[in-house]
Image (cartoon, rainbow, N blue to C red):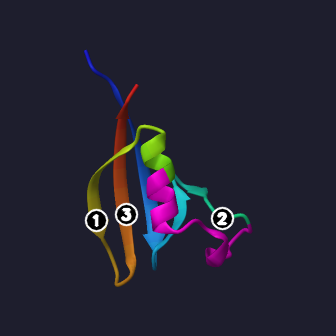
């Protein structure tokens, strides 16, 4: 039986702020210290994560859903 793990990412204005609730920036609450969406996607893909859905929220924000096989 195949098993998956999931990753939920919150982004705002092309910056990834949180992944599974954990702040992604180098400086707390400084959005500019967070990775760009392109940087994050490249890193996540290299780790085996596959983007499976995007849920746009307010203007400029979205939740991204990833999965990978365990």
Q: Which residues are magenta?
A: 27-42
Compared across the picture, whether 6 is left or right of 17 comes to left
The quarter of the displayed image where residue 30 is located:
bottom right
CA distance for labels 3 and 2: 17 Å
Pinpoint residue 69: horizontal percent, then vertical percent.
35, 29
Tag on residue 25?
A: 2
Residue at 51% across / 50% down in the picture? Answer: 43
Q: In the picture shown, does residue 23 fall above or below 29?
A: above
Q: Secondary structure at mark 1?
A: strand
Q: Quadrant of the N terminus?
A: top left
Pinpoint residue 56: horizontal percent, then vertical percent.
29, 71
Q: Are marks 3 and 1 in contact (CB under 8 Å)?
A: yes
Pinpoint residue 61: horizontal percent, then vertical percent.
39, 76
- Residue that numbered label 1 is attached to: 55
- Residue that numbered label 3 is attached to: 63
Q: In the picture shown, does residue 55 fall above or below 14?
A: above
């Amino acid at each position: 039986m195949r098993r998956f793990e999931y990753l939920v990412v919150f982004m705002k204005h092309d910056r990834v702020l949180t992944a599974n609730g954990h702040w992604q920036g180098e400086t707390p609450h400084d959005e500019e210290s967070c990775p760009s969406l392109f940087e994050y996607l490249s890193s996540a893909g290299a780790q085996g994560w596959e983007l499976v859905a995007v849920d746009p929220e307010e203007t400029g924000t979205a939740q991204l859903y990833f999965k990978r096989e365990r």
